[in-house]
Amino acid sequence: MKKLFVEKICGDTITLDAEQSRHVAKSLRMKVGDMLTLCDGVDDYGCIIDEITKNAVTLSVCYRQAGATEPNIKVSLYQGVPKGSKLEDIIQKCVELGVYEITPVLTKRSVSRPDEKQAAVKQKRYAKIALEAAQQSGRGIVPEINTMTSLENALSECGAELKIIFYEGGGESLNKLIKGDLKSVAVFIGPEGGFEKDEVDAVIRAGGVSATLGPRILRAQTAPVAALSAIMLLTGNLE
């Protein structure tokens, strides 16, 4: 079933807001009697559409069940800001794959450096992409897209059990780093051109480890997808 995220569900009858109602009626072209899943970030609610008006869609809750689509590991992606719309593609694909949160990071080789106003506009766009990807892929949460920050700030705020920086200069294999009981991991991926050596050293000083994704150099938009896919496989989330 199609899925929508809502802030809170109270009672057995739900009326969607105007934007979601238009999405259901016009974009999804759903009709009275169709089933729709609503999610409050914890549970999934199977609902049937009772009424569609110009500005509202009303549904009745048929059943409630615990969400079962979230991975057993929280992966935080710290992505070096790439050029153009590449970050939008990264957000979409990584949300589909199960990322917990994404933080755009301005590194020394980041060519794109939006000012505060531009960054605010991009932030809204990124949040919308994450929401749409989460709904499309049946996620149980909408991953947070954090505000753009520096590598220094990212390291000071990162509380993951394991920090991994992927570096073309080589490093450990993921097979050796990812253990079955690992609950959280932070993944640092560079922009076009990768990280400078002193940035890699900074992550290692902060308790991180350098790792490799193989002998080939991956594009900025390919590396996070490859890393996330490998982590999900190694932690049993693609079974």
Image: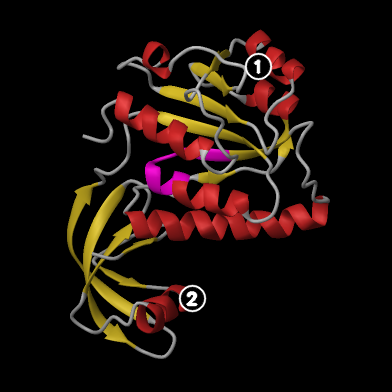
Which residue lies at the image location 76% right of the left edge and 16% below the top edge? 198
Indicate which disc residue 181 carries. none
Would you identify the image quadrant in which residue 32 lies? bottom left
- State the image coordinates of residue 149 (x, y, percent, origin top left): 72, 36
- Give the colour scheme of this rendering: secondary structure
CB under 8 Å between discs 2 and 1: no
Which residue lies at the image location 42% right of the left edge and 30% below the top edge? 74
- State the image coordinates of residue 216 (x, y, percent, origin top left): 52, 28
Which residue lies at the image location 32% right of the left edge and 40% below the top edge? 70
Q: Which residues are magenta?
A: 94-102
- Outermost residue on the bottom side: it is 54
Which residue lies at the image location 40% right of the left edge and 60% below the top edge? 6
Please, what is the three-letter code of the amino acid marked with disc 2?
Glu
Q: In this picture, is 69 found above or below 179? A: below
Please, what is the three-letter code of the amino acid marked with disc 1?
Val
* Residue 180 located left or right of residue 146: left
Q: Nearer the viewer, residue 202 or 143?
A: 202
